[in-house]
Amino acid sequence: MRRASLAAAAAALVTVTLAGCGGGSTPATTTPTPVLNTQQIVVDLGPDLNGQKVGADNSLYTNVQICLPGSSTCQTIDHVLVDTGSSGLRLLSTAVGLSLSYITDASSNGIGNCIQFPDTSFQWGPMAKVDVHMAGEIATVPIQIVSPTNFVGPPTACSAGGVAANTVSSLGANGILGVGLFRQDCGAPCASSSPPNVYFTCPSSGCTPTTVALTAQLQNPVWMFGADNNGLSITLPAIGATGATTVVGTIGFGIGTQTNNALGTGVLAQAATAKGMFTTTFGGVAYTNSFIDSGQGAYYFLDSTTTKLPNCPSGDAAGLYCAPSPVSLTAMTSGPNPSSSGTIVSQNIAFSVWNALTLIDSGNPAFNNIGGPNPGAFVWGLPFFYGRTVFIGIEGQTTPAGSGPYWAY
Amino acid sequence: MNKALILMSALTAAALPGWAELGGSVETVATDQVRLQAKRAITQMRDYNIHLISRDDGTLIKEYVTPAGKVFGVSWTGPTIPDLTQLLGTYSAEFQTSVRAQPRRRRAGVVRNPDLVVESTGHMRAFYGRAYVNSMLPSGVTAETVK
């Protein structure tokens, strides 16, 4: 206590001294020193597994530091997947070295969190509250610890016959950093009296779905930062048609909150629906269930019949498009202006799709021209991010371009 | 026939074995309704019926039923993915096996086998998809009906 008081006094003294230096003879108008709001992101061959790179295709990673709340007991975890398609931080238990206490409900039962992906993979595990540090930003939030050995296994309502993405080899990452359009992973449905299969209370008799208040759900850490919390941006350089061995870019926090994160000239903001969707028009047809997802490694859109792009043969590239030569395509994205006007804002997106088998077999991990089918809609996956800055306006957060949820690019 | 279906009580349905499911009989649709804690409405079309199952959380499941009372297609939208092991019934294993046979990527789950077609996509808060069995489509009904 005494030591803390002394430290605080010393800190105050330093502050005064600094202000005195900078102020000169004019009255000090103190502008708080901006927090460092950018950090590096990378597309590479992924995390180490038994001394070798796991070998990912078009996976975007960053480092995340987690600390016991309010402490300097911390650890930095590399190769966490940057995912604009989900919200909340999920770390493989095998990557977490800190001794964390799991969150329990009012009856002291463990609470399990479940996320299911359309490819039938899923992640299951308890939650723990930590300080998430990225750049100079800090958020104190619950995160998911995936498949720790000291927590009950997944209920069948979560596994649903699928495969757990709970190892470096099955996930291709040490965790998922969900920094999408939404504040929480689930939102209102999970806070209702009839919750879906996301949060489970787990007494010894077994896990059953349970209601969890918005504030206790997994949070997109960005909107919980003390500053620069209205959104984020992802910037990746352009790459060539044969791919790249490593691509280094930047994740930036805040929109219009500092001198380095204004939308900029020519950048158009397009609101997404409450479900995070917008319209993509291709070949004269409007596909209303389209979205931007850095967690998916290709342009996933429509089907071979509609796109006239041949499907790849079975093998490494099964489920992707294999065009014999690069095919240039254009689609138009549309959404209301997130500012008060609400006028529909549209822009044409030129993109290219080539032979996924050739690209994958090249051994490069980064491609801007890999595509595959997605039923009835466009998923603008990681290739969309090369050569762009993509802004994500978080739901309910105010920015100079209007309130989220929106995309801007 | 349809009136009887509408009047089928949840209690009766709960006693029935199995799940309604793709390829299953229409009685299992009611079982789904109970297990999903959902409401149900039936729309009669010329060549088939649609059983619409809705939950308060926004989940909407449509089960497409032949005049003979077999479920030939299902579709869904919702904040989470409905339990496909239940919805796909005996076709669930084929779906899982076929998905796992593909190289692992973060993307939609799409299976286009000669008879079974499953398309599952979306993201947290907004998933959607459909499944149908080609050989069970009533005459005059195309796969595009299931949506």
Image (cartoon, coloured by chain):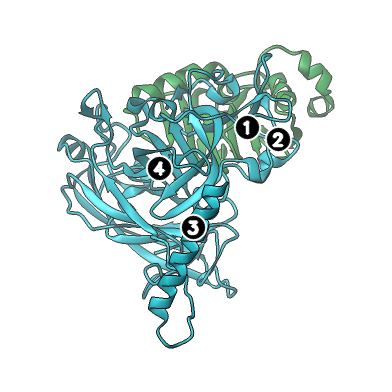
Rendered image: mark on residue B84: none
Q: Is residue A267 something that shows in the picture?
A: yes
Above or below, A351 against A122 in this view is below
How far, Cα to Cα, is label 2 from label 3? 32 Å
How far, Cα to Cα, is label 1 from label 3? 31 Å
Which residue is under mark 4? Answer: A65
Which residue is under mark 1? Answer: A199
Which residue is under mark 3? Answer: A279
Labels 3 and 4 in the same subunit: yes
Counting residues from the N terminus, which is met first, the one under dot 2 or under dot 3? 2
Counting residues from the N terminus, which is met first, the one under dot 4 or under dot 1? 4
Give whichever of A263, A76 is nearer the camera: A76
| Residues marked 4 and 1 touching at CB (< 8 Å) | no
Circle 2 residues within 10 Å: few <14, some 14–19, many ≥20: some
Which residue is under mark 2? Answer: A211
How far, Cα to Cα, is label 4 from label 2? 29 Å
Q: Amino acid at mark 1?
A: Tyr
Counting residues from the N terminus, which is met first, the one under dot 3 or under dot 4? 4
Left or right of A409 on screen, residue B66: right
Question: What percent of the width, then of the height, locates residue A267?
Answer: 39, 70
Labels 2 and 1 in the same subunit: yes
Counting residues from the N terminus, which is met first, the one under dot 2 or under dot 1? 1
Above or below, A119 against A225 in this view is above
